[in-house]
Amino acid sequence: KKTVAILISGGGSNMVTLVDSMLNDPGHPGRPCLVLSNNADAGGLTKAAERGVATAVVDHRPFGKDRAAFEAELVKPILNAGADVVCLAGFMRVLTAGFVSQFEGRMLNIHPSLLPKYKGLHTHARALEAGDDRHGCTVHEVTPRLDDGPLLGQAEVPVLPGDTPEDLAARVLVQEHRLYPAVLARYLRGEHAMLRLS
Ligand code: GAR
């Protein structure tokens, strides 16, 4: 099996769906080897430990603006765990080209918009402000440009009258939990064609 490290910053609901998809399917091509957070208070750490997955924390704050120094520490537990593939799942730190290049072609991210629309933050509010009637989420391969890189999968949701950003975030998150495990399993089997869920 290929070993998968998952990077989180918060609640880790996407991480849980990835871990459970691997642990609950004996024929899955992947095995979770590490859940790594930049935030010691991330709720996802407990959920990973409950599932018997190794966890680690590298706090970004002592490094201030020095992203390279932070990343020099961040990479250590990933290398120690021998991860074949790295999944960003609600990991809220921007990674430099130097870090990304170490995992070229084997790092995935989930982003809460229909990329290339709405890279960066506040995607749900921006979709509402634009008056979009469709919104959704994207899994893509990570390249040095933020929220860029080859698209591996997308799932759409409708935008409904009266939606708040929170309503939309919740509707999109349901689809994230379907999309990311499906894309990861395909990816580990070498299928890189775009998956569209509706
Ligand atoms: C998810 O909606 C994910 O798409 C988003 O953060 C949330 C994390 O939730 N990621 C980003 O915004 C990346 N810039 P989770 O911790 O419950 O998986």
Image (cartoon, grey):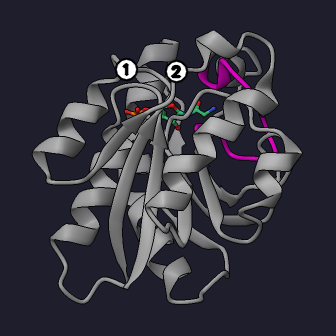
Residue visible at 70% across and 39% down in the picture: 72
Residue tagged 1: 40
Asked whether disc 2 touches disc 1, contact meaning CB atoms under 8 Å apart, the reply is: yes
Find numbered disc 2 in the image and state the secondary structure of the residue it sits on.
Answer: loop
Residue tagged 2: 59
- Magenta run includes residue 28: no
Q: Nearer the viewer, residue 126 or 68?
A: 68
Residue 115 spot, x, y in % from top left: 75, 47
Residue 66 spot, x, y in % from top left: 80, 20
Magenta span of residues: 112-124
Q: Nearer the viewer, residue 132 or 85?
A: 85
Q: From where the camera sits, is residue 7 visible? A: yes
Q: From where the camera sits, is residue 137 visible? A: no
Q: Would you place residue 163 above or below residue 17 in this image?
A: above
Q: Nearer the viewer, residue 155 or 33?
A: 33
Residue visible at 48% across and 70% down in the picture: 184
